[in-house]
Amino acid sequence: KKTRFSHSCRGLPDSILDHDTIIWLGDLNYRLASGCGDAYELLRKNDWQALLEKDQLRIEQRAGRVFKGWEEGRIYFAPTYKYLSNSDHYVVQTSTSKEKRRTPAWCDRILWKGEGLKQMWYVRGESKFSDHRPVYSLFSVQINVANKPKPKPISSEIPKPSTTLAGLSSTCVVAKVQSEEFWFLTRAQSCIQSRPR
């Protein structure tokens, strides 16, 4: 179903892809291309860049078949899938006949599209409650404030901080995005102050 907004909210985008700025994250389920016989050796050497050359998402993006015009930060971390639960071992390293053998891959990703986004960092977390490792990213986002109030006449009164922020035509918002959950930060909050414990 489509989310419905009140009639006072005209001009909102009809679909996700109609928005000016989009951050797409989660288990995108892309794997390493088949025939990657040297994957285990590259994995042992922590040669992520060589493994990423065989990454299906990157191959499909370069061919223009998926996520055309989308960006992803540079990956400097180990593959995020498939781990034994509560373990640092990939399933393939300790596979039994019951386990489905999977070549480790970067299934969990954060992509973005649009103007005014700058990725500050892109890392994976070490939560062990799943066969995936979560990925995290921090973005600096340049936004334009809609319905900017008219400037007030100059007075000797010192404006309150919230008044100063509301009067800006554009501002920068820092948002932490992760694949487990995410939250929104107001312009007046910092990421450190808002981080849930």
Image (tube, rainbow, N blue to C red):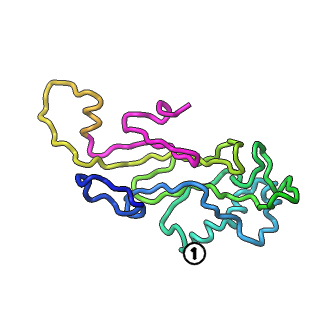
- Measured from the top left, where is residue 170 in percent x and y? 30, 46
- Can residue 155 be seen in this snapshot? yes
Residue 94 is a magenta residue:
no
- Can residue 121 be seen in this snapshot? no
Q: Quadrant of residue 41?
A: bottom right
Viewer-proximal residue among 164 and 146: 146
Q: In this view, does 120 lie above or below 100?
A: above
Tell me the crowding category of disc 1: few under 14, some 14 to 19, or many 20 or more residues within 10 angstroms, Cα based. few
Q: From the image, tell me which residue sits under label 1.
A: 63
Which residue is at 72% across, 62% downward?
Answer: 51
Name which residue type carries label 1.
Ala
Q: What stretch is highlighted in magenta?
A: 168-197
Q: In this view, does 2 lie above or below 159?
A: below
SS at circle 1: loop
Q: Quadrant of residue 163?
A: top left
Residue 178 is a magenta residue:
yes
Q: Is residue 97 left or right of residue 4?
A: right
Which residue is at 69% across, 52% downward?
Answer: 80
Q: In this view, does 184 lie to the left or right of 103?
A: left
Question: If the image is split into quadrants, where does the C terminus sit?
Answer: top right
Number of disc labels = 1
Q: Is residue 53 above or below residue 137?
A: below
Viewer-proximal residue among 96 and 171: 96
- Measured from the top left, where is residue 96 in percent x and y? 87, 56
- Measured from the top left, where is residue 77 in percent x and y? 68, 50
Which residue is at 16% across, 42% downward?
Answer: 150
Q: Is residue 134 left or right of residue 25?
A: right
Of all residues, the one furthest to the right in this rendering is 97
Which residue is at 62% across, 70% downward?
Answer: 59
- Measured from the top left, where is residue 36 in percent x and y? 77, 68
